[in-house]
Amino acid sequence: MKCGKPLRLEQKEYCGDCMRTKYSFTGGRAVFFYHGPMKESMYRFKYSGRREYASFFAREALRTQGRYLDTIRPDCIVPVPLYRKKQLKRGYNQAEDFAVALAHLSHATVDTKLVRRTRNTLPMKGLSAADRKQNVRNAFSVDQKRLIKYDYQRILLVDDIFTTGSTIDAIANVLTRDLDRKVYFLCICTGEGT
Ligand SMILES: [Zn+2]
């Protein structure tokens, strides 16, 4: 009902993380389940320059989550930023490619300047839930002038993989700090809820 993770028990409405954690985001969904061939696909999309996957992911996102996105009606789509040096090295930000493709198909606005990653955080892979949270704490800053100028009230964050939600939540926390703004997310992949 909140993070969109698939659950084994049909009668359950919230996963363990959503029950335990008071997230700053309102809710979100993902397009694919992160397992099997999707793991390889995400790896190629992130690290092997397969940027063209973005348009397929965006098409599938609209096909499977279009109705959800219609209920959110976001004022803008914001990709989770990479640390600037990391992006220069990799040559692109896969979340940004996905955001641009999604916005193109749904005639929405992308804002890549609103959120900045101010610290070069460790890769999340292999970190515990607590370490993930600590890793992204104070790692993002928001351009407040921009936020006010465009009067964003409903923001859709997009990223490649949703795991414990700590990255999305860290950004949502900064975006909702002073105003009752709604932050949602759409990720390409998600894990199973427990
Ligand atoms: Zn959940």
Image (cartoon, rainbow, N blue to C red):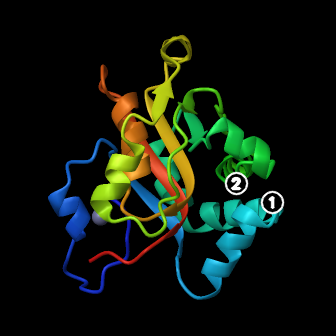
* Foreground of the two, 161 or 185: 161
Residue at left 43%, top 49%? 167
Q: Residue furthest left?
A: 20
As displayed, is residue 102 above or below residue 193?
above
Residue 34 screen position, x and y as percent? 52, 77
* Above or below, 136 relative to 129: above
Name the kind of residue labelled 2 in the image.
Gln
Q: Is residue 71 above or below residue 117?
A: below
Say whether marks 1 and 2 touch (CB < 8 Å).
yes
Q: Residue at x 43, y 27 (%)?
A: 153
Query: Which numbered tag is attached to residue 31?
Result: none
Mark 1, residue position = 51
The residue that mark 2 highlights is: 94
Q: CA separation, marks 1 and 2? A: 7 Å
Counting from the top left corner in percent of width and height, residue 102 is at 68, 51
Q: Amino acid at mark 1?
A: Arg
Can you see residue 1? no
Question: On the image, which quarter does residue 32 sit in?
Answer: bottom right
Disc 2 residue crowd, few under 14, some 14–19, many 20+, Cα 10 Å: many
The front one of 86 and 111 is 86
**Element marked by disc 1:** loop
